[in-house]
Amino acid sequence: MTHSNLIATVFRQEVLALSAYSVADASGLIKLDAMENPYHWPEPVILDWLESLKGSELNRYPDPKAQKLCATLRQTYAISGQFGLLLGNGSDEIIQLLLMALPPGAAVLAPAPGFVMYRQISRSLGLEYLDVALKASDFDLDLPAMLAAIDRHRPAIIFLAYPNNPSGNLFSEDAVLEIIQASSGLVVIDEAYAPFANAGFIDRLGRFDNLLVLRTLSKLGLAGLRLGYIAGNPAIIEQLDKIRLPYNINILTQITADFALRNTALFSRQTQAICNERAEVFKALSQFESLTVFPSAANFILFRTPENQATAVFEGLKSRGVLIKNLAPQGGLLKDCLRATIGTPDENRAFLKALRICLKQ
């Protein structure tokens, strides 16, 4: 049997039709493509962290329920004990758990453009993935279209990123609440960028049995740990826990995340610095006459280049040592669009300088 015949025999057609998630090589470049916190920890904090790791028993399996870390998360983010809490290896794993729990062929709904993993994982599992275009003018929810899709398809899960990735905006709060009320399935509010938005739905969990709030520590400044968590109705969280792999949060992640969450003042200062820089970068980008720049409540900014110039600008920036995200190949509302993560002041200045050269301004 040839390799191609073997693959065609073994793997599902949904998997064969997919392309692997691609991550650009950022070696030697200013990395502004992945919405990471650009700031390191101060040396005294690093030393205290290393001290906290000394007692870790790497020869033992970690606490399967990460009880200490869960207690710290609840205390830090005011998550009441009446709600269930489940941790994942990044929020991606939790999205995968949610979708794995659905019956075959179930419908999954999300706005477009949105976080690509909703679609990627749904399709890999053979689910019916449906998207509803956002408003072209401001990337807000098209509420009538969303409600019509809910009524027609009765999705088992609706994902709403708040703020949205890749557009960076907060959807209308009233529209989100109406969607939650209209849905007979789960509504997952993905708050990956909550640290930069000063907005969220954690305090609404008690009002809706079908509401779940998904968050990650990656954007806060712990991308290397790969830790996400979801909170909501304990009966729903119990079902997800049945298919969560045991020991999915390793001991070093548990200790490090707990340590970090006990140093929230450091992350608050870094978050504020990023928000301040976001305002400066937005102001600078808005001065480019040829660009359309979209307001952001996240740690990145989406902007549209002149027609058919996005890829050339992207490559021009890369040749000058700056890597951002080229979204133009996705088409639709993202045609001609690029997305830049907010970096340090020096990184942002380098990006803007290179952009001026690329746009000849």
Image (spheres, rainbow, N blue to C red):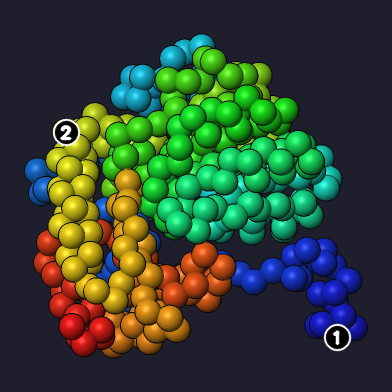
| Number of dots carrying numbers | 2
Which quadrant is the C terminus positioned in? bottom left
Q: Which mark is residue 2?
A: 1
- The answer to which of 137 and 336 lies nearer the viewer is 137
Q: Secondary structure at mark 1?
A: loop
- The answer to which of 238 and 172 lies nearer the viewer is 172
Percent coordinates x, y for residue 159 in the rendering: 59, 42
Q: Which mark is residue 168?
A: none
Q: Is residue 184 left or right of residue 301?
A: right
Residues marked 1 and 2 touching at CB (< 8 Å): no
Q: Secondary structure at mark 2?
A: helix
Looking at the image, can residue 57 be seen?
A: no
> In this picture, is 115 found above or below 291?
above
Crowding around mark 1 (Cα neighbors within 10 Å: few <14, some 14 to 19, many 20+) is: few
Percent coordinates x, y for residue 200 in the rendering: 40, 31
**Of the residues shown, which amino acid type is indicated by label 1?**
Thr
- The answer to which of 35 and 132 lies nearer the viewer is 132
Q: Is residue 328 left or right of residue 320?
A: right
